[in-house]
């Protein structure tokens, strides 16, 4: 276990990514604690206002993300500067994605049902970066041998196949599986071969003249949502707080 940790995590080239992930998660957790205290009217915290304008934390988040991103691009992966810029970028990304729903809807939906999207995006982002730290790389081209690197045709074919499976899973309405499938090809394969979600582009086009397949897709989606919607909402409420009843 210690050898795996040293080889995959503490490896100098991956240290900035580890620091960015740690600062990203920590920033999100602290931000959620602060905003929940503000919502409950507890503690010394309050909304930041300038001239009567409520300044959302996505604003400093964008500034920090830009600084950290450009700084990371212009620095070496093994220096002190890269570590600092990685932390700055992680903090900025945590602030920005915590208000992802606000950016998506162009409205202050932080404590509404739509605001749950922010929590989901943060969790997915952290999981993807965690997979990359564990040794996975997009499109399954990690740990290539010298022969595989020399045979570029096989590499291109593998990347193209992985991309096609992820795109197929996305067209079937399985966005999470498509995203994770870019990192882990097996996930994209599972998403590509399973029945599509009823409202997905694939179902509307392919199942239009196949009533039995359409009925099976609707039944499977109903059973899936019935089983997982409740636990998913409870986890989202635990992480991000319950939305305001409407």
Image (tube, rainbow, N blue to C red):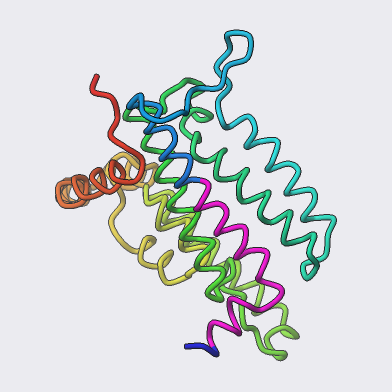
In percent of width and height, residue 123 lies at: 43, 52
What span is colored magenta in the figure?
4-27
Check if residue 66 falls in the magenta segment. no
Residue nearer the viewer, 246 or 207: 246
Tell me where residue 142 sits by quadrant.
Answer: bottom right
Left or right of 61 in this view: 152: right
Residue located 29% across and 30% down the image: 243
Residue located 64% across and 79% down the image: 154
Q: Residue furthest top?
A: 52
Residue located 41% across and 53% down the image: 176
Q: How many numbered circles does the render carry?
A: 0
Left or right of 209 in this view: 63: right
Check if residue 22 falls in the magenta segment. yes
Q: As displayed, is residue 154 above or below residue 159?
A: below
Q: Can the viewer see residue 221?
A: no
Q: Can the viewer see residue 200?
A: yes
Residue nearer the viewer, 119 or 187: 119
Tell me where residue 72 sits by quadrant.
Answer: bottom right
In percent of width and height, residue 163 lies at: 55, 62
Q: As displayed, is residue 55 above or below residue 125?
A: above
Q: Residue furthest front?
A: 44
Residue located 51% across and 88% down the image: 2
In percent of width and height, residue 91 lies at: 61, 47
In percent of width and height, residue 21 lies at: 56, 58
Q: As displayed, is residue 134 above or below residue 192?
A: below
Residue nearer the viewer, 119 or 24: 24
Name the image quarter holding the C terminus: top left
């Amino acid at each position: 276990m210690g050898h795996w940790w040293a080889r995959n995590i503490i490896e100098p080239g991956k240290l900035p990514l580890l620091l960015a992930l740690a600062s990203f998660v920590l920033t999100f957790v602290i931000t959620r604690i602060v905003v929940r205290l503000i919502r409950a009217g507890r503690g010394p915290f309050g909304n930041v206002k300038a001239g009567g304008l409520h300044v959302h934390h996505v604003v400093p988040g964008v500034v920090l993300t830009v600084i950290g991103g450009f700084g990371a691009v212009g620095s070496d992966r093994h220096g002190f500067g890269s570590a600092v810029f990685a932390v700055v970028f992680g903090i900025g990304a945590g602030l920005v994605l915590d208000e992802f729903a606000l950016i998506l809807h162009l409205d202050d939906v932080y404590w509404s049902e739509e605001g749950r999207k922010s929590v989901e995006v943060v969790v997915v982002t952290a999981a993807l970066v965690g997979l990359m730290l564990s040794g996975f790389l997009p499109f399954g081209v990690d740990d290539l041998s010298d022969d595989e690197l020399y045979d570029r045709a096989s590499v291109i074919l593998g990347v193209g196949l992985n991309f096609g499976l992820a795109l197929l899973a996305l067209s079937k309405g399985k966005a999470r599986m498509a995203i994770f499938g870019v990192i882990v090809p097996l996930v994209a394969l599972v998403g590509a071969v399973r029945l599509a979600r009823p409202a997905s582009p694939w179902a509307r086009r392919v199942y239009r003249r196949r009533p039995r397949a359409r009925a099976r897709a609707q039944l499977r989606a109903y059973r899936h949502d019935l089983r997982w919607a409740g636990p998913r909402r409870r986890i989202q409420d635990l992480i991000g707080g319950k939305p305001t009843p409407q």
